[in-house]
Amino acid sequence: MPEGIKLFTGNAHRELAKDVAKYLGIPVGDATVTKFSDGEIMVRINENVRGTDVFVIQPTCMPVNRNIMELLLMVDALKRASARRITAVIPYYGYARQDRKVQPRVPISAKLVADLITAAGTSRVLTVDLHAAQIQGFFNIPVDNLYATPVLLDYIKSNYTHEELVIVSPDAGGVERARSFAKRLQCSIAIIDKRREAVNISEVMNVIGDVEKKDTLILDDMIDTGGTTTQAAGALKEKGARRVIAACTHAVLSGSAVDKINKSAIEELIVTNTIPFDSKKEQCKKLTVLSIASLLGEAIKRIHEESSISSLFI
């Protein structure tokens, strides 16, 4: 058991926090996170944290604003309780898609959230598969952006014949991710040429690459409404793909995403548990959930021991 380390969590993903704590061999810290009748959040740390190295696990997923506020208040409470160092462990970073100005008079929300997390008293941030890597530069504190690639790769290698697999990027922006994944599996890649007509609405236009009579794996960092992924699956089938599998780190699955996936050509959707699923796992029989608890746990252990975590960045 690491000495001088404490692990706390809000209400966003207690199951993941328990798994990480189990990996580290420590209990989840005693904290009360509730709300008053008017909706204000109340946080109280129920144990001594003076001089300790504290890690707060809190993905800022749905309900996004509540979970962000819980994180900020927990960090503030720990800071005022004289914790030596506070690391915000954010497996899924909300507002990450709003990382630049794409229209006049709009905010850069990812930067604002970074400022809020820093201003609350956070010493460093540990996250997984940021939607845009440049978000690390929005912080003036150290940020470790881990990748779920090892977790996904192990599963793919164990369950699919990678010699017959084609890694598919659902858009031009994901080509580097697909190429890196394909390189480790020593297989080819394909690209979906997609034109987005409006926010959360996409139209698949063409498939670049040979997918005929091949097993295809659509790889993305997140799946939100499911439109891009399911349309990509349909396009691959039209081009003669033998099987269509999908994989992503963050399964947001908002709106009618589960229904779209159930009705799509996708045979299996492989995701990690950066976001809690509630009833979605029961509603979507195609869903396979892999745990990142050991990845986060190892990173936390190395950060606490001030040792290198570079080997986890693959």
Image (cartoon, rainbow, N blue to C red):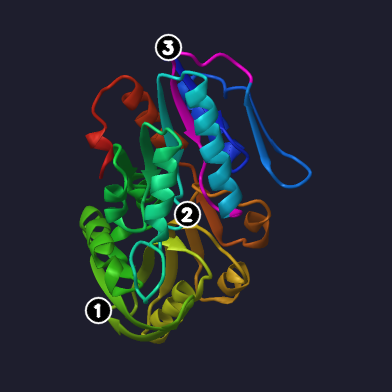
**Residue 9 point in image, percent of width and height:** 56, 33
| Front of the two marks 1 and 2 | 2
**Residue 111 point in image, percent of width and height:** 37, 54
Specify start and end residues of the magenta stretch as a single range: 46-63
Three-letter code, disc 2: Gly
**Residue 97 point in image, percent of width and height:** 40, 63
Name the image quarter holding residue 36.
top right
Residues at circles 1 and 3 in contact by the CB criterion of under 8 Å: no
Is residue 59 rendered magenta in the image? yes
The numbered disc on residue 209 is 1
Whether 301 is drawn above or below 108: the answer is above
Dominant SS of magenta comes to: loop
Q: Nearer the viewer, residue 232 or 141?
A: 141
Q: CA distance from mark 3 to mark 2?
A: 31 Å
Three-letter code, disc 1: Gly
* Element under disc 3: loop
* Element under disc 2: loop
Q: Nearer the viewer, residue 279 or 30?
A: 30
* Residue under numbered circle 2: 94
Q: Earlier in the sequence, mark 1 or mark 2?
A: 2
Whether 148 is drawn above or below 178: the answer is above
Q: Is residue 59 visible?
A: yes
Residue appearing at x 29%, y 48% in the figure: 136
Residues at circles 3 and 2 in contact by the CB criterion of under 8 Å: no
* Residue under numbered circle 3: 3
| Front of the two marks 1 and 3 | 3
Binning the other alpha carbons within 10 Å of mark 3 as few (below 14), some (14 to 19) or many (20 upward) gives few
Three-letter code, disc 3: Glu
* Element under disc 1: loop
